[in-house]
Image: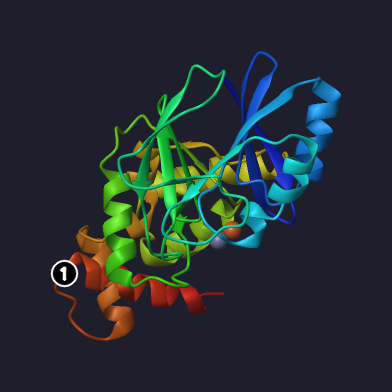
Amino acid sequence: MDIHALRAFEDNYIWLLREGRRIVAVDPGEAAPVLRYIEEQSVDLAAILLTHHHGDHCGGVAGLLQHQPVHVYGPAHEAVAGVSIAVGEGDIVELPGLPASFRVIDVPGHTRGHVAYYGQGALFCGDTLFGCGCGRLFEGTAQQMWASLSKLAALPPDTLVYCAHEYTLSNIRFALAVEPGNAALEARAASVAALRAADRPSVPFQLAVELETNPFLRCSVEAVAGAASRRSDRPLSSGVEVFAALREWKNVFR
Ligand code: ZN
Ligand code: FE
């Protein structure tokens, strides 16, 4: 099975899983790039996977269903138009005609019902974990997002993370402000800058690299906790407090 990136809007990725002439689209915020791919490659759409209800992730569903009626898997705990199979924690998604199955992980925080799909060594996590960052808390609490990220961080370190936005470079600027002495982060800054200068995606990336460089997964590291505490000008005694302080800091970081 191959995985292709389609660009959508400013900085979204629509991920296509492909086996032979069948594809599955993950978070098609627009139909047009997927329809173009289907036409150019003469492939069939077999299913759609959705992580959450935001328009830049599911806005293309109606247009794709018009082209080809397929099953749409989406989060059980939020309302998304077009979803035919509602999924939640622990469900296994077997994709029709693809040698792939995915385990559903509930990851509330960015939205209340956000889900991620994990299988074949790949994680599709929408707007929960980003390269060197994480999604904003639009509906959930810091506690929820912290718990969700902790679940993702516990997956095998060689997991390839397919998030839905190309935010890595700007996230790295923030990460460097939090943890300036992190050599792995400096190395990542250089490699991602080179990729982006060549107009290549920084996604997917390995979870192991995230664990070494993403401040939101490093709340128990002394340098990160110390920076968050200095910034918020109070002692922070738990991982979730550090996480909440980092998230607030990032919201106003320019
Ligand atoms: Zn979103
Ligand atoms: Fe998004």
Quadrant (top left, top right, bottom left, bottom right) of the N terminus: top right
Give the image quadrant in which the ligand numbered 2 is located.
bottom right
Going by the image, does 85 lie left or right of 81?
left
Going by the image, does 165 lie left or right of 32?
left
Quadrant (top left, top right, bottom left, bottom right) of the C terminus: bottom right
Q: Which residue is mark 1?
A: 238
Q: Give whichever of 10, 53 is nearer the camera.
A: 53
Q: What percent of the width, then of the height, locates residue 188?
A: 48, 44
Kind of residue sitting beneath label 1: Ser
Residue that extends furthest to the top in the rendered view of this protein: 20
Going by the image, does 222 lie left or right of 133?
left
Residue 183 seen in the figure: no
Q: Residue at position x 50%, y 48% from top?
A: 74
Q: What percent of the width, then of the height, locates residue 197?
A: 71, 44
Going by the image, does 243 lie left or right of 194?
left
Q: What percent of the width, then of the height, locates residue 138?
A: 48, 72
Q: Residue at position x 48%, y 37% from top?
A: 205
Q: Is residue 159 above or below residue 61?
A: above
Q: What percent of the width, then of the height, locates residue 49?
A: 55, 41
SS assignment at label 1: loop
Q: Is residue 62 above or below residue 33?
A: below
Label 1 neighbour load within 10 Å: few <14, some 14-19, many 20+: few
